[in-house]
Amino acid sequence: MSAIDAHCHVWSTGDGEAFRMRDKIPALARDFTLEELSALQRRCNVEGTVLIQAVDSAAESERLLAMAARDARVLGVVAWADPTHDDFEATLERYRANPRFVGIRPMPHDTFGGEWLREAHTRRAFAHLERIGCPVDLLVQEADLDALCELLGPFGRLPSVLNHAGRPCVMAGERGPWRSRMRRLAQCPGLLVKCSGLTERAGVEWTRETIEPWIVDLLDIFGDHRVMFASNWPIVTLACRYDLWFETVSSVLADVGLPAAGRDRVMRQNAVTHYGLQGVVQ
């Protein structure tokens, strides 16, 4: 079964960007190239990837779009813009002129808090995104999932996807509060969730047994029509090999009895549908 990786990053340490995670974690402070990623994906029968912004910079997003124009394995790019800034709509329209633009990850510059989810500027930005039908990636901490649910409530037609399973504290093993928040979020009809980021939240001592319940919960809460496979490479390398994450997700889907059509939806088709990749993939 072939797959699409719905969430990867690439970067060069010589790109001149200030990237906090790369700068503070030695294992990430090197070049992670599309060539390296493609070699890993070919071994797993992953046919291509969606590149996601890593830096709060329109310049980085433009570089990723240029990369996509040169390499067919980049199926699309999710770019960055600040939803609290007055130039949000103009930035978005500039991206939309590029055929490899498939979505936006809206976040204020240099923040990972949830205050922006409650701002009037953000609500106006999301209303505009819903009007034009632009897919939205959402990077939100578990503590802010309730605020995200309140934001998304009025925008039932907005195609959106929650990154990294809502960033639960897998290491602590406390699934109850996270599961309750995710069930509430699942009531937002346009929302999907990426099955990624779990090993990073579990730490290097994770096992398939510790990860499987979280994947099963995602399937139980959202169903196989609303879960998509993603690796979060190269962040995933802090706790896991690319092929091991791919094998873990694939084997869990098979072992819980998900039919082949359901496994294909999670591993490939949901990304195609959500990001509008029908004209790009075979």
Image (spheres, rainbow, N blue to C red):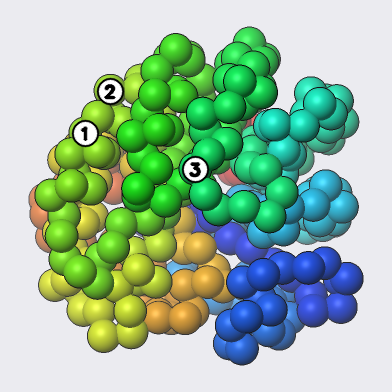
Amino acid type for the residue under numbered disc 1:
Arg
When the figure is inspected, residue 193 is found, relative to residue 174, above or below; the finding is: above
Distance from the alpha carbon under mark 3 to that under mark 2? 20 Å
> What is the x, y in percent for residue 245?
37, 71
Please say if the residues under marks 3 and 1 sit with CB atoms less than 8 Å apart: no
Under circle 2, the secondary element is loop
Under circle 1, the secondary element is helix
Label 1: few (<14), some or many (≥20) within 10 Å? some
Check disc 2 and report the residue beneath it. Answer: 187
Check disc 1 and report the residue beneath it. Answer: 183
Q: Nearer the viewer, residue 268 or 103?
A: 103
Distance from the alpha carbon under mark 3 to that under mark 1? 19 Å
Decide which of tag 3 and tag 1 comes sooner along the chain.
3
- Quadrant where the N terminus is found in the figure: bottom left
In the figure, residue 73 lies in which quadrant? bottom right
In the figure, residue 42 lies in which quadrant? bottom right
> What is the x, y in percent for residue 277?
61, 36
Check disc 3 and report the residue beneath it. Answer: 114
Amino acid type for the residue under numbered disc 2:
Gln
Q: Nearer the viewer, residue 208 or 198?
A: 198
> What is the x, y in percent for residue 159?
51, 25
Residue 240 visible in the picture? yes
Distance from the alpha carbon under mark 2 to that under mark 1? 7 Å
Horizontal arrangement in the rendering, residue 89 relative to residue 25 (left or right): right
Under circle 3, the secondary element is loop
Foreground mark, 3 or 1, reads: 3
